[in-house]
Amino acid sequence: MKYLQKSKLAKLIQGSLFSSLVLSGAAVAQGEEAGAESAQLEVIQVTARKRVENAQEVPVAVSALQGDNLDAYSSAGMDIRFMNAKIPSLSVESSFGRTFPRFYVRGLGNTDFDLNASQPVSLVVDDVVQESPILKGFPVFDVERVEVLRGPQGTLFGRNTPAGLVKFDSVKPSQEFEGYGALSYSTFNSVDFEGAVGGGLTDNLSARVSVLKQTRDDYIDNRAPNNFINDVTGGYDEQAARIQFLYEAGDFTALLNYHMRDLDGKPIVFHANAIEKGTNKPVAGFDPEVIYQDSVQFATQQVESQGSSLKLEYDFEDHTLTSITGWESAEIYSRADVDGGYGCGNDFVFGCPTPEMGPGFIFLASESADAIPSHDQISQEIRLASNFAGDFNYQVGAYYYNEEQTIETFGFDGLGGDFNWGYVFQEQDTTAWAVFASADYHVSDKLKVSGGLRYSDDKRDFRAVRLVTPGDFNNIDLEKSANPEDSHVSWDLSAAYKLTDDVNLFARAANSFRAPSVQGRILFGDEVTVADSETINSIEFGVKSDVLDGRGRVNATTYYFQMDDQQVTAVGGSANFNRLLNADKTVGYGLELDSEWILTDELFATFNISYNKTELQDNSLFLQGCFNCTITDPFVEGKGYSLDGNSLPHSPEWISNFTLRYSKEIGDGEFFAYTDWSYRSAIDFFLYESVEFEGEALLEGGIRSGYLWEAGDNEYEVSAFVRNITDEQVFIGGVDFSNNAAMVNQPRIMGVEFKVSFF
């Protein structure tokens, strides 16, 4: 399988994305003229403000994934990165692979690859925040709905939400006996099974058990001299489970959730000198399924995590009291050939120079491993919400969070051996607490205003020790520590105006912050860096409308934000470590459009598009650059390359997604065909701008088609699917400290699936 540029088919589809929306409207109009049945779009319920509300009436830019879209996107054993470019202004990437996803909303995210990195996009699963980057990679299965809240969410959801929030809600237990099982087989001997079963145990107690099992064979060959190995990496073996118990008695409910994950896989592959100097194109003969590494046989990625939560709710006359207690724990060991090649040409690194090296010049042989041997997170939220029948309602609450973790970083000789030439032990303790309140008031039948406040206090204690010998704390080479803390008052104000029964206008202003961050991966440097708190002020205006008698839905939002003291990560450069910096100011603005259309009773389409522009504004912000690339930023002697005016890394200006589903009753069942296409424009991999490390635009498409029928009390489905149908593979990330190494997206995956649902 070779590296592919955009095929003619991909270019055609990319060029027709916007026209699809226009054609959708025309098709609906034709259906109306023909006297089509008045089928209507379903009402989407969201919990964006910790109440169940109609998404069309919430004064927040929120999008939801559920049903067919969610099933299709996650086909072929896809991990959480399937969400990339599937929702306006949302992108997801990872330099680890199936673990440690990094989320970006409206261009705001964090490229930091260290295991204690914080992100400005929060992930909340079943009402519990998943703060550690390793927790964020939990598999997606038996999920009822995914919500993405764009813009600051610092009032109700708290810490680390200045960019937005991604929220997963699992299917909950009920008294009804129901469940499903789905088994698929696809390319590279990939096997994907997921299933769930639930129902009532007593009149008051119900339960639901959900399981997942995913495997894929290694399919990438190694061709380094004296290290030829076929099918050495690229595979994984992952399993996960969730069990829930729901107790309901009158006005009281209790939901207990326990979940676990076990991954034995391989890290994402680094291809040494894959980018041709002076371009962002692949070198001649590049093959994404071939690598040239001297230590790939040691590559591994092992993750174990578990957690539980208890949600208690009591409804009394005019109020609901809610308590959510959460515990999460994770362990990881990930080892990779970071330089992506073999041998080394540097006289100052152990084991170099070597008789031969490649592909191309390898300045620094780097093989490293990172581990979290110990991690525990405890959170507690309690809130009181009114249920008044009148014009005024409110919520008040308090929140507590504590995370303790230890991190290990190992350095190896980089030449395929196990000799250890460096070890760093880090420990970090984070404690945060907050109190918050929000209120809604109906000024009139058409106008509702809302407001909220949150006081947050956040403290972090960090210590890093570099040892001569792993585990020998009597022989310390270097010790560093940092203890930042800060407090902040976040707020939001919004207004929703019902222009007509089908059209709602809204305006929202919000402020949020991200607490100070610490980074001290001192295996490759001597510096522990601290980034001060970042704060954001944002304003947005939007319209949410149901059109064509409920057969169409169009939502649009425009926004502007200014972030002060943004925390940015200087990744790589001259060594394999991170430094945290604060940019004086970052501004961003954009436009987002979501739409759904019932074209005919047999044809359903969705289309969304977003434009996001970000700009760093700091004439004192400079960085050293990459080892062997062409940087286009101005260079100032003694300071480095100026970042002033640059866009943020991994921040595409354009994101778009289009889906089309056709269904037809045939015999005793239904034939269906579904296609989806997502596009994101070019991105910069790092804070500086360079020719080589600008990722090309990426267009990926999928198809799913099958037959659905009922027999007895069961529903059966057989289908075939393809992900990345054009097999377009482009560079999605890079490593700049040693050579022009790069990572690519996943290849085309084809498979079949059988599913049975019982009621």
Image (cartoon, helix red, strand yellow):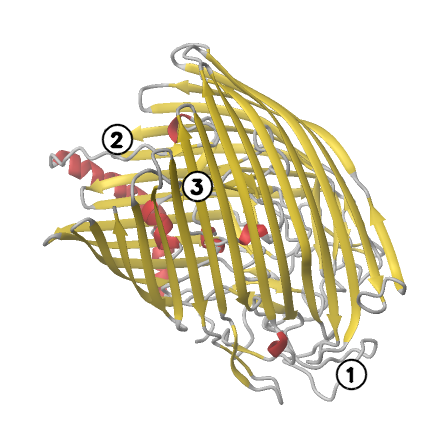
Going by the image, does 60 lie left or right of 516? left
Query: Which residue was labeled with disc 1?
Result: 353
Amino acid type for the residue under numbered disc 3 = Phe
Cα gap from disc 2 to disc 1, whole angstroms: 69 Å
Of the numbered discs 2 and 3, the one sitting upstream in the chain is 3
Contact check, label 2 and label 1, Cβ < 8 Å: no
Disc 3 or disc 1, which is closer to the eye? 3
Please indicate whether residue 334 sits to the left or right of residue 593 in the image: right
Marks 2/3: CA–CA distance: 37 Å
The location of residue 530, given as percent across then percent down, is 78, 46
- Where's residue 744, x and y in %? 52, 66
Say the numbered circle drawn on residue 506. Answer: none
- Residue 333: x %, y % from top left: 64, 64
Query: Circle 2 sits on which residue?
Result: 550
The residue wearing badge 3 is: 245
Residue 130 higher or lower than 510, as above or below = below
- Name which residue type carries label 2: Gly
Quick check: can you spot residue 205? yes
N-terminal label among 2 and 1: 1
Q: Amino acid at mark 1?
A: Pro
Percent of width and height locating residue 31: 16, 38
